[in-house]
Image (cartoon, coloured by chain):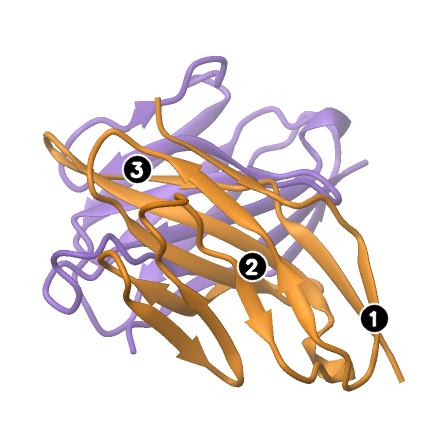
Amino acid sequence: GAVVSQHPSRVICKSGTSVKIECRSLDFQATTMFWYRQFPKQSLMLMATSNEGSKATYEQGVEKDKFLINHASLTLSTLTVTSAHPEDSSFYICSARDRAGAPNTGELFFGEGSRLTVL
Amino acid sequence: GDSVTQMEGPVTLSEEAFLTINCTYTATGYPSLFWYVQYPGEGLQLLLKATKADDKGSNKGFEATYRKETTSFHLEKGSVQVSDSAVYFCALSDRRAGGFKTIFGAGTRLFVKA
């Protein structure tokens, strides 16, 4: 099946610094990737849809200047948390669809997740 | 709009017990339905899916049937194991202009005791 890889799996940073999380589709091309945030014991909250070669579409209430998304190639999307603060600490998950493999079902393939801790 | 409602957890069972996690949905179109599983500290992975009414998805002993008349997609397993302890998410994907939109349920945490 399609594989999505996320890196880093864990990151600890100081308040005020920026952190970049990468999401790669390893064996398929993903023109669209999705970024989620998950708080402890809660469901996934869609933050934004990342579109290859164009601007990301952010969900209501998500600060686009805070969470920068870049999707420069068909296999890589990055999420940068700028000027991170402790309240940004969370589990961030990316996903993508393999349009060639499952074109009509909407199935998603998920990365392993990245746990961000801001001190 | 579309929505997914699943039973609240946590659900605690003994090993070899029967599992049911209820999931109902509302959708304007004809969505595909999914169960995803999240093991501790990991991302989500697909457990099973069904793309049209009366389809039954199955994997690793888990089953769910797409019931259009009751708008349900309940997850069942006849005999759970400790290794099934995880969070289970019911989800639907509905085709919209420009692509699919996926809606997740709140998740149900399952604890299986030895």
Please state if A24 lies on the left or on the right of A75 as rendered. right
Residue at mark 3: chain: A
Disc 2 marks a residue whose amino acid type is Pro
Query: What is the spatial separation of the Cα atoms under label 2 and label 3, in whole angstroms?
Result: 16 Å
Q: Quadrant of residue B54?
A: bottom left
Residue neighbourhood size for the residue with mark 3, other residues' Cα within 10 Å, grouped as few (<14), some (14–19), many (≥20):
some
Residue at mark 1: chain: B
Comparing labels 1 and 2, the label whose residue is closer to the camera: 1
Above or below A90: residue A99: below
Mark 2 or mark 3, earlier in chain: 2
Q: Colour of chain A?
A: purple
Q: Position of residue B104 (x, y in %)?
A: 47, 42
User: Are the residues under marks 1 and 2 on the same chain?
Assistant: no
Residue drawn at (34%, 71%), measured in percent from left and top?
Answer: B56
Which residue is identified by label 3? A70
- Is label 2 in a helix, a strand or a loop? loop
Residue at mark 2: chain: A
Comparing labels 1 and 3, the label whose residue is closer to the camera: 1
Disc 1 marks a residue whose amino acid type is Leu
Which residue is identified by label 1? B13
